[in-house]
């Protein structure tokens, strides 16, 4: 699976060596607060998840999101630091649509636009490489940072699963958002990309 590049990011294939890092991320309640994960996951369970993931079709494999970091030392080259992961989930071949998911596990990289940039890179890959027609996601209504990032990446609100998520003793709405290929094409013609 080739890497995907954007201005500040590289999305590369997840490797078995990434499993301990994933477990560290999903063991942090702040990281998983807005994810579908409900219970802690052991290293053994994550290894089983990894085996299942690599048995899926290649377009559904997980990408590790890496941010470009340039050390202050002049004699040191830029490095790629893993900050999260992303993937298309259950690509429907006939309908040419897929759900997308993202997790930014390194909290020190939050609120810097990396979620939006990751989604834009994945939209470009999904529409221009995989020839998808529609890319969609689910986001909890109380995930204000995520909603803002998805809106900046061109996702449109489609609907609401009313009180579809239970967390911390309350039910929350779940928003359904998507981008269609023609919307992506027209936005990128306007931007000159």
Image (spheres, grey):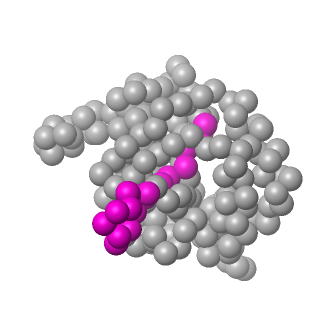
Q: How many marks?
A: 0
Residue 84, placed above or below residue 133: below
Residue lying furthest right in this view? Answer: 44
Q: Left or right? Give the position of 40 relative to 75.
A: right
x and y, in percent, of residue 15 in the image: 65, 43
Q: Quadrant of residue 129?
A: top left
Residue lying furthest front in this view? Answer: 75
Residue lying furthest bottom in this view? Answer: 169
Going 70% across and 38% down the picture, which residue do you hit? 53
Residue 80, placed above or below residue 93: below
> Is the C terminus in the top left, top right, bottom left or bottom right quadrant?
top left
x and y, in percent, of residue 160 in the image: 51, 57
Q: Left or right? Give the position of 140 relative to 54.
A: left
Q: Nearer the viewer, residue 61 or 170?
A: 61
Q: Is residue 109 rendered magenta in the image? A: no
The answer to whether one can see residue 158 in this image is no
Going 75% across and 64% down the picture, which residue do you hit? 38
Q: Quadrant of residue 63?
A: top right
Going 42% across and 40% down the picture, which residue do you hit? 4
Q: Left or right? Give the position of 33 relative to 79.
A: right
Q: Left or right? Give the position of 63 relative to 33.
A: left
Magenta segment, which residues? 61-79
Q: Nearer the viewer, residue 92 or 104?
A: 104
x and y, in percent, of residue 19 in the image: 72, 53
The answer to whether one can see residue 85 in this image is yes
x and y, in percent, of residue 78 in the image: 38, 57
Going 46% across and 70% down the picture, which residue do you hit? 109
């Amino acid at each position: 699976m080739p890497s995907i590049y954007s201005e500040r990011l590289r999305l590369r294939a997840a490797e078995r060596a990434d499993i301990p890092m994933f477990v560290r991320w999903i063991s942090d309640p702040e990281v998983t607060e807005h994810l579908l994960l409900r219970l802690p996951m052991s290293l053994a369970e994550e290894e089983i998840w990894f085996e299942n993931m690599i048995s899926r079709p290649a377009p559904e494999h997980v990408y590790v999101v890496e941010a470009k970091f340039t050390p202050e030392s002049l004699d040191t080259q830029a490095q790629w630091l893993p900050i999260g992961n992303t993937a298309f989930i259950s690509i429907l071949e006939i309908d040419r649509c897929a759900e997308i998911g993202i997790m930014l596990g390194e909290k020190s990289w939050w609120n810097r636009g990396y979620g939006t940039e990751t989604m834009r890179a994945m939209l470009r890959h999904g529409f221009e490489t995989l020839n998808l027609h529609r890319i969609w996601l689910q986001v909890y209504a109380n995930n204000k940072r995520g909603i803002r990032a998805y809106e900046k990446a061109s996702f449109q609100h489609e609907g609401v699963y009313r009180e579809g998520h239970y967390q911390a003793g309350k039910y929350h709405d779940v928003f359904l958002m998507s981008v269609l290929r023609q919307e992506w094409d027209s936005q990128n013609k306007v931007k000159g990309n």
